[in-house]
């Protein structure tokens, strides 16, 4: 998609709670997010105050590294484009988003009606929305987003998000280049599994290209590699700088609002880019201050809601991981259990 100032790739993430894993996979590829909020009477309250998905989606977006957010207050035609309704939703959401880690300067609130087409690209002359709103449209707000700084100087890492076949390229993998660059003919290794091969062709936005860089979402045709052994969530890397794998690692996690505290031996599913891995929290090492990292209590018996802690995580098989301080794009993860997000974390150290 092209706007006046930007060339964009849109990722549509479903809003229903049953599809949060798909939403996590999409957020891991995103540089910014548009949070669509239903402005209809009662609908916003159900999604925000009644345990709806607005809270979980906003927290996950920030926890997974997205810093810029556009809040599209949609369906305002159902309330007569009421300024009071828009202001009320903004007053409710703004403090929550700040507590979730978003800077107010990085959040834009935009009223709109997708059904009527109002304030997506422009406001029609007869629409009463224009009598009180003179801010950016949805497209204008997207143009105001700051371009991210790409990790071009880091070793090559391409996170595989899909595997399929095409008539032109045959068996292919698709994914986002998290860091470094990739060119046609380059020798690569796929981990876990240590499968070696070379890049036969690269497609970007349906066109053949010779080079892909950090931030690009591309389709690759590989040669010399057994495609049956490549899995979604695997990482393609430079043969000289393969990504580490580990079954045990230390992480700092932030616990969300949960009904029961986390204890030693707690089992959950770790969502890491496009992969899902069963894990166990084998040690609760200490609770820490969220801002400073100062140790508050060593060897806690449990972790309640809204606390930050250093824990030991044990996986059932080797997983591709990077220490957050060295490679932010591949050092974040989310923990979910029984259909609910319970924590988000950063990898601190690989143990084995």
Image (spheres, helix red, strand yellow):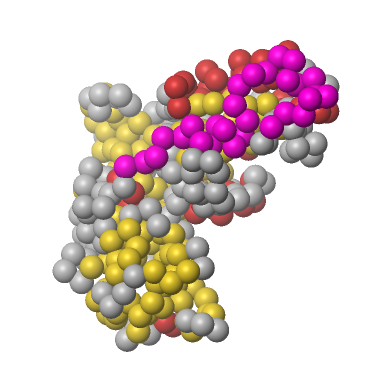
Which residue is at a point 75% across and 37% down the rendered structure image?
A: 117
Residue 316 x, y percent position in the rendering: 36, 63
Q: 241 and 299: which one is in front?
A: 241
Q: Is residue 136 magenta?
A: yes
Which residue is at a point 28% across and 61% down the rendered structure image?
A: 181
209 relative to 297 in the view: left or right:
right
Which residue is at a point 67% across and 18% down the rendered structure image?
A: 133
- How many numbered callouts? 0
Q: Is residue 45 magenta?
A: no
Q: 327 and 221: which one is in front?
A: 221
Residue 93 can be seen in this image: yes
Q: 250 and 191: which one is in front?
A: 191
Residue segment shown in magenta: 122-149
Q: Is residue 102 above or below residue 185?
A: above
Q: Is residue 191 above or below residue 339?
A: below
Say which quarter of the image contains residue 126.
top right
Residue 189 x, y percent position in the rendering: 27, 73
Which residue is at a point 81% across and 28% down the rendered structure image?
A: 77
Residue 24 can be seen in this image: no
Say which quarter of the image contains residue 288.
top left
117 relative to 51 in the view: left or right:
right
Residue 196 x, y percent position in the rendering: 27, 79
Residue 179 x, y percent position in the rendering: 29, 55
**Secondary structure of the magenta portion, mostly?**
loop
Q: 1 and 226: which one is in front?
A: 1
Q: Quadrant of the C terminus?
A: bottom left
């Amino acid at each position: 998609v092209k706007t006046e100032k930007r060339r964009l790739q849109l990722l549509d993430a479903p809003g229903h709670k049953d599809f949060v894993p798909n939403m996590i996979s999409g957020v891991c590829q995103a540089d910014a997010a548009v949070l669509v909020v239903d402005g209809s009477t009662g609908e916003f309250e159900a999604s925000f105050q009644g345990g709806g998905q607005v809270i979980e989606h906003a927290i996950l977006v920030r926890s997974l590294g997205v810093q810029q957010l556009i809040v599209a207050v949609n369906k305002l035609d159902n309330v007569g484009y009421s300024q009071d309704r828009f202001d009320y939703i903004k007053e409710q959401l703004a403090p929550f988003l700040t507590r979730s880690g978003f800077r107010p300067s990085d959040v834009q609130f935009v009223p709109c009606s997708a059904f009527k087409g109002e304030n997506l690209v422009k406001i029609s002359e007869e629409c009463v929305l224009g009598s009180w709103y003179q801010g950016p449209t949805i497209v204008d707000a997207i143009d105001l987003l700051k371009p991210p700084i790409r990790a071009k100087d880091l070793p090559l890492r391409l996170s595989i998000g899909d595997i399929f076949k095409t008539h032109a390229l045959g068996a292919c993998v698709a994914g986002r280049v998290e860091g470094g660059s990739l060119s046609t003919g380059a020798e690569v290794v796929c981990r876990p599994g240590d499968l070696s091969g070379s890049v036969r062709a690269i497609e970007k936005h349906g066109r053949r290209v010779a080079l892909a860089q950090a931030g690009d979402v591309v389709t690759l045709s590989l040669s010399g590699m057994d495609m049956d052994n490549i899995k979604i969530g695997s990482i393609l890397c430079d043969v000289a700088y393969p990504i580490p794998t580990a079954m045990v690692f230390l992480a700092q996690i932030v616990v969300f609002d949960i009904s029961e505290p986390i204890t030693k031996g707690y089992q959950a599913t770790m969502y890491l880019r496009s992969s899902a891995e069963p894990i166990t929290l084998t040690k609760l090492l200490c609770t820490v201050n969220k801002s400073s990292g100062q140790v508050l209590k060593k060897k806690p018996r449990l972790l309640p809601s809204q606390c930050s802690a250093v824990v030991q995580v044990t996986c059932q098989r080797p997983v591709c991981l990077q220490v957050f301080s060295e490679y932010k794009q591949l050092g974040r993860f989310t923990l979910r259990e029984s259909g609910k997000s319970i924590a988000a974390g950063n990898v601190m150290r690989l143990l084995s």
